[in-house]
């Protein structure tokens, strides 16, 4: 196994000392026109895989953002077999994956030195441009989208993007689904651990009116005992294009029921990774997610356009969990409704002495109605209630941004964003109401610059601020807190270079840093939902990405990220943590792969990702765990122009790895899946 891991690491390094896969590939769907994402001269993005669109190129809302942007093409997303959609982010460079492997509470992805524990959720998630985080920043809504319905995934890193406020601490991710076109795409999959899946995506477009529908179902027994998962998703999208305006509506619904295998001691994890203790035999839960939105894009005048979205999202999550034999089982019931809107105006006047000028102003509001209840239980029988909170949260903000191009080789983007917060919390157990912290107006200046001195070479730098406020009851003045807390401010910068040489070479290197004041983290198992003060923190690192296409039909790609995340000035109550590593943040992340077209109708891919170990607690006193290298292989054969057969082997080297955490008493392990084989047939009409 060590030999396999060493060989895999060497292969990743040779595949490029790191970053994003092939930029464009021919579409296997004859009814859809493949189009390269035509990047502007000062483009700082990478595209992993190919983006297939109907008509003009897929619009990227981040075109004016001069920071590290990565786009995962729909072709790669649609081919994957995953229990949870967040796993697709393994194909993007510099992403940390945290795999709890506990039913509906499966895991998260994170970037830029933040962990995926759920204590600080630092990525703003959007689906078709609609905010999709839970109140605490969690990414539950990501499971309402399945791979076959994905057109692209756009990941924006850093603090320079002014478009979003809440949860946009380290960046944002937008999952774009298939809208427009006439097609029928169906995929059936079966494989390891009793897994069966069916997905159907269909589109009809005539006379400016497009309809897109999706239905998907996944059923798996899971690698471990007591790990069954059943999930069903449906979506409908209706848009009408008037020429100068487009209006549309999207409805998406997901329901899931899952068992949880629980956590193992170190000894049992080494002895039998598939087992589940009897204390977990009634753990699990059900989840229902809804997302409904209206969309408008219009050209108001020749030099003025607007984009508007209104939405409602609903979440119902009912979970029973017992972490170990030493603690009681809990029932955790979460119900959230979010109502909001986003409006953006873009003005592009002609100015004689400038090469180009764009002025953009936008605003958004989000109104949340949240309920969080918890009980101690005995085999799903309620024994005592420990939490009964009903709280509302309203966050509204706006920004203005100018994209100034004095010449064709220079772009300057100053921006300013502000946000305000209001709300109150009712604690029904204490029969008390608490006001929210008066965070004031949260000011976030930003500036980006890009220079293209020669064709194919772009140098860029940016600076910006983002913010963090408390989640759940942590945002309110709950005694013993009686005075207002200030928001935690993240100040970050990035400097990078991207180089493109024809269609065979693409590379990007970026240095970055983020420093936070008064960073807080949720107490995940606290009955009151309170937080701890982590203190002043600093995260910094380097991202290196490379893509090579030496000859037609052969693509090599790789990515390496080093991230250094430390506590600079800790909470006065824990002075010994000064200089310590932030928990669950691996210092090294790497990925790479090889894509081949060895003969007509054949496709072969080999790719993998991995990370180094991490500390388990801010005290750095429980050892380091979590390192792994996982490789996946895929072979596909085009039986006819419309029918493809494929086989995918995940964890090719049968790597034994796991997620580990310290519960205050003992180490708890959640083992990941061993080698697994899946077969699929895909039909496109």
Image (spheres, rainbow, N blue to C red):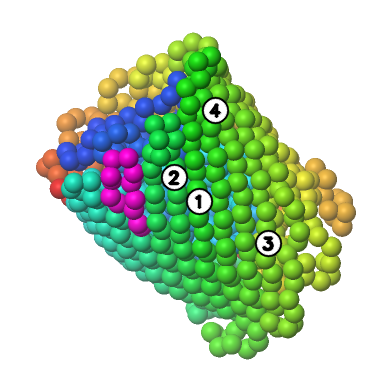
Could you tell me if the residues under marks 2 and 1 are in contact, i.e. CB atoms within 8 Å?
A: yes
User: Circle 1 is placed at which residue position?
Assistant: 342
Lower sequence index among marks 1 and 3: 1
Mark 2 or 3 closer to N-term?
2
Q: Residue furthest front?
A: 301
Label 3 environment density (alpha carbons within 10 Å; few <14, some 14–19, many ≥20): some
Label 4 sits on a secondary structure element that is strand
Among the 4 quarters of the image, the one containing residue 477:
bottom right
What residue would you read off at disc 2? 307
The residue that label 4 is drawn on is 403
Q: Residues within 10 Å of mark 4 (few under 14, many from 20)?
A: many
Report the predominant secondary structure element of the magenta stretch.
Answer: strand
Q: Nearer the viewer, residue 360 or 57?
A: 360
Please state the horizontal and vertical placement of residue 116, each as a whole percent of the image.
59, 53
What range is drawn magenta here?
A: 239-250
Please tell me whether mark 1 sits on a helix, a strand or a loop. Answer: strand
Q: Residue at x 55, y 51 (%)?
A: 364
Residue marked by disc 3: 422
């Amino acid at each position: 196994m060590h030999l396999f891991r060493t060989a895999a690491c060497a292969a990743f390094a040779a595949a490029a000392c790191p970053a994003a896969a092939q930029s464009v590939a021919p579409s296997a769907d004859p009814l859809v026109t493949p189009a390269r994402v035509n990047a502007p001269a000062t483009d700082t993005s990478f595209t992993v895989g190919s983006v297939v669109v109907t008509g003009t190129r897929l619009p990227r809302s981040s075109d004016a953002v001069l920071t590290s942007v990565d786009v995962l093409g729909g072709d790669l997303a649609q081919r994957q077999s995953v229990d949870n959609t967040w796993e697709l982010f393994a194909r993007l460079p510099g992403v940390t994956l945290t795999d709890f492997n506990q039913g509906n509470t499966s895991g998260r992805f994170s970037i830029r030195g933040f962990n995926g524990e759920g204590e600080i959720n630092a990525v703003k998630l959007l689906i078709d441009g609609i905010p999709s985080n839970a109140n605490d920043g969690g990414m539950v809504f990501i499971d309402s989208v399945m791979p076959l319905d994905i057109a692209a995934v756009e990941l924006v890193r850093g603090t320079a993007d002014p478009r979003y406020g809440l949860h946009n601490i380290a960046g944002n991710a937008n999952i774009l689904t298939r809208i427009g076109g006439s097609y029928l795409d169906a995929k059936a999959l079966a494989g390891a651990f009793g897994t069966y899946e069916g997905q159907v995506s269909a589109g009809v477009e005539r006379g400016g009116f497009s309809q897109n529908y999706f239905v998907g179902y996944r059923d798996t027994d899971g690698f471990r005992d007591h790990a069954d998962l059943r999930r069903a998703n449906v979506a409908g999208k209706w848009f009408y294009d008037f020429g100068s305006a487009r209006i549309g509506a999207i409805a998406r619904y997901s329901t899931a029921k899952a068992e949880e295998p629980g956590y193992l001691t170190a000894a049992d994890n080494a002895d039998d990774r598939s087992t589940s203790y009897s204390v977990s035999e009634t753990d699990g839960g059900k989840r229902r997610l809804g997302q409904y939105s209206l969309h408008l894009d219009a050209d108001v005048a020749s030099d003025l356009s607007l984009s508007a979205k209104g939405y409602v999202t609903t979440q119902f999550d009912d979970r029973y969990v017992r972490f170990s034999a030493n603690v009681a089982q809990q029932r955790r019931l979460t119900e959230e409704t979010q109502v909001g809107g986003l409006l953006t105006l873009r003005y592009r006047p002609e100015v004689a002495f400038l090469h180009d000028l764009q002025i953009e102003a936008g605003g958004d509001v989000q109104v949340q109605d949240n309920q969080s209840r918890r009980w101690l239980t005995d085999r799903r029988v309620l024994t005592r209630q420990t939490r009964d909170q009903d709280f509302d949260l309203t966050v509204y903000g706006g920004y203005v941004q100018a994209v100034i191009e004095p010449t064709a080789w220079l772009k300057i983007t100053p921006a300013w964003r502000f946000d305000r917060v209001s709300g109150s919390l009712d604690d029904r157990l204490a029969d008390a109401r608490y006001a929210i912290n008066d965070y004031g107006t949260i000011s976030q200046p930003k500036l980006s610059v890009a220079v293209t001195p020669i064709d194919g070479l772009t140098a860029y730098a940016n600076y910006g601020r983002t913010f963090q406020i408390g989640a759940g009851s942590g945002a309110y003045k709950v005694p013993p807190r009686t005075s207002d807390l200030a928001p935690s401010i993240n100040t970050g910068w990035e400097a990078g270079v991207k180089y493109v040489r024809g269609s065979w070479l693409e590379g990007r290197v970026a240095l970055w840093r983020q420093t936070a004041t008064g960073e807080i983290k949720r107490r995940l198992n606290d009955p009151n939902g309170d937080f701890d003060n982590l203190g002043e923190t600093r995260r910094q690192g380097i991202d290196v990405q490379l893509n090579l296409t030496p000859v037609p039909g052969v693509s090599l790609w790789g990515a390496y990220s080093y991230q250094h995340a430390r506590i600079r000035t800790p909470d006065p109550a824990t002075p010994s943590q000064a200089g310590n590593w932030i928990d669950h943040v691996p210092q090294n992340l790497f990925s790479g792969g090889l894509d081949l077209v060895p003969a007509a109708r054949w496709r072969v891919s080999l790719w993998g990702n991995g990370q180094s170990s991490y500390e388990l607690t801010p005290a750095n006193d429980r050892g380091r765990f979590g390192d792994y290298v996982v490789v996946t292989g895929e072979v596909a054969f085009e039986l006819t122009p419309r029918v493809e057969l494929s086989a995918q082997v995940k964890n090719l080297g049968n790597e034994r790895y796991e997620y580990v955490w310290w519960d205050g008493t003992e180490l708890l392990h959640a083992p990941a899946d061993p080698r697994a084989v899946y077969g699929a047939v895909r039909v496109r009409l």
